[in-house]
């Protein structure tokens, strides 16, 4: 592989995914644990967990973490690396739903520009951060918004799909949101921006789970239990560098999402009537499942506006939640992946995550 392709599409993307995991995703898990514990009663420790998770999930913090992860993976000089925090912070906020993708592109450019002047002058401590920050900020102001709009166009496709028959809608929404979750764009932001709840929200949860649980199980022989936790409760975006090297590894999860999506909408009629953002979170901190459950008993305002009302879940509701979110993604992706391994489309080590 070309050294530049490896530097920008493998190393940088891997660093970005690790930065995302170390901020937004781990923050989401901490925050969710705190929120659920607070249901038991007010407690200073539980509130601390919510606050700590909220800080880690802040868009500025997430952007900085991703940019630093990119710089670290590219092995840039220290002054360039530290300067990327400001670039990533601004870019992620300006990029909206396309924040992670914008950070990936702009942080790489800013890092390389900073690299060009690093240690070339006697006032390196001023010149290098100046060039890195100003170049990154300028590109972010000019381009991040449009990268975000491009990412949000997937949401337009999803909104169009919600007007179709539940079977077709289930396939399209599940596949598209599942793909968005794994790509360096924000599926959660897309779902929140378009108020995705109800059956469409359920299909979105199905697609996210197909990717997260699917990749966790599919890559178990390479990544063992660490991969189960980091992908199953974290993000399937960690596999993007491997997907760039071998796109076939993504097909089992995508095919699974095309199966579980319509099962969610037509057979189990699984609705996600919690906060719309939960539709795009999948099993990350179990936010998607908590969204479905809270939506049964206390639908969110946007869900109520879309016609939802509180229900008493029956056996089929609980069965659907478990099958769509955990069992079917694991079994189907594993089975399809086994076939792909036998015919040589997936080889040993293709799904190995960088430590």
Image (cartoon, rainbow, N blue to C red):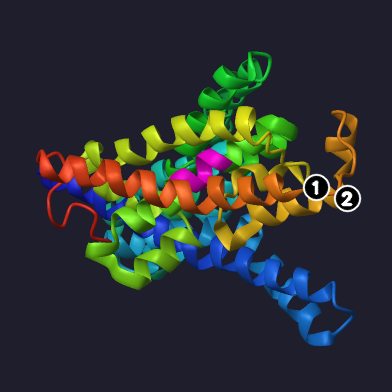
Using the numbered discs, state the Cα–Cα distance from disc 1 to disc 2 in whole angstroms: 5 Å
**Magenta part of the chain:** 206-210
In the displayed structure, would residue 156 be above or below residue 41?
Answer: above
What residue is drawn where x is 28% and y is 61%? 353
Give the camera-side residue of 269 and 97.
269
Q: Quadrant of the C terminus?
A: bottom left
Give the camera-side residue of 322 and 103.
322
| Other residues around mark 1 within 10 Å, as few (<14) / some (14–19) / many (≥20) | many
Regarding mark 2 in the picture, which secondary structure is present there?
Answer: loop
In this rendering, would 43 be left or right of 292? right
What residue is drawn where x is 85% and y is 72%? 39
In this rendering, would 59 be left or right of 8? right
Q: Position of residue 211 (x, y in %)?
A: 43, 45
Number of dots carrying numbers: 2
Give the camera-side residue of 203 and 84.
203
The residue where tag 2 is placed is 298
Give the camera-side residue of 296 and 204.
296
Residue 253 image-quadrant placement: top left
Q: Position of residue 45 (x, y in %)?
A: 77, 86
Residue 81 image-quadrant placement: bottom left
| Residue 316 among magenta residues | no
What residue is drawn where x is 61% and y is 18%? 161
Q: Position of residue 144 (x, y in %)?
A: 54, 36
In this rendering, would 206 be left or right of 76? right
| Other residues around mark 2 within 10 Å, as few (<14) / some (14–19) / many (≥20) | some
**Can residue 106 be seen in the rendering of this structure?**
yes
Q: Are marks 1 and 2 in contact (CB under 8 Å)?
A: yes
The residue where tag 1 is placed is 295
């Amino acid at each position: 592989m070309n050294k530049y392709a490896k530097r920008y599409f493998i190393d940088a993307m891997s660093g970005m995914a690790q930065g995302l995991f170390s901020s937004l995703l781990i923050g989401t898990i901490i925050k969710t644990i705190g929120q659920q514990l607070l249901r038991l009663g007010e407690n200073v420790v539980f509130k601390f967990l919510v606050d700590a998770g909220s800080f880690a999930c802040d868009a500025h913090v997430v952007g900085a973490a991703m940019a630093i992860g990119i710089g670290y993976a590219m092995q840039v000089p220290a002054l360039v690396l530290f300067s990327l925090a400001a670039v990533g912070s601004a870019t992620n906020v300006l990029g909206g739903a396309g924040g992670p993708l914008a950070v990936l592109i702009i942080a790489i450019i800013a890092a390389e520009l900073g690299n060009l002047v690093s240690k070339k002058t006697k006032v390196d401590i001023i010149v290098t951060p100046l060039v890195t920050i100003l170049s990154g900020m300028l590109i972010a102001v000019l381009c991040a918004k449009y990268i975000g709009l491009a990412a949000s166009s997937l949401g337009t496709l999803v909104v169009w799909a919600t007007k179709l028959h539940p079977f077709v809608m289930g396939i399209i929404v599940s596949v598209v949101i599942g793909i968005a979750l794994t790509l360096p764009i924000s599926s959660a932001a897309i779902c929140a921006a378009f108020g995705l709840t109800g059956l469409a929200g359920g299909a979105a949860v199905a697609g996210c789970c197909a990717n997260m649980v699917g990749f966790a199980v599919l890559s178990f022989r390479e990544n063992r239990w660490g991969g189960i936790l980091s992908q199953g409760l974290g993000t399937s975006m960690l596999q993007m560098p491997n997907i760039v090297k071998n796109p076939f590894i993504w097909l089992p999860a995508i095919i699974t999402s095309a199966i579980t999506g319509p099962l969610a909408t037509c057979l189990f009629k699984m609705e996600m009537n919690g906060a719309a953002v939960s539709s795009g979170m999948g099993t990350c901190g179990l936010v998607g499942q908590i969204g479905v459950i809270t939506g049964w008993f206390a639908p969110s305002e946007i869900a109520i506006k879309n016609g939802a009302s509180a229900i008493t879940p029956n056996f089929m509701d609980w069965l659907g939640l478990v099958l769509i979110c955990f069992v079917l993604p694991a079994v189907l992706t594993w089975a399809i992946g086994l076939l792909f391994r036998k015919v040589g489309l997936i080889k040993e080590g293709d799904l190995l995550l960088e430590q």
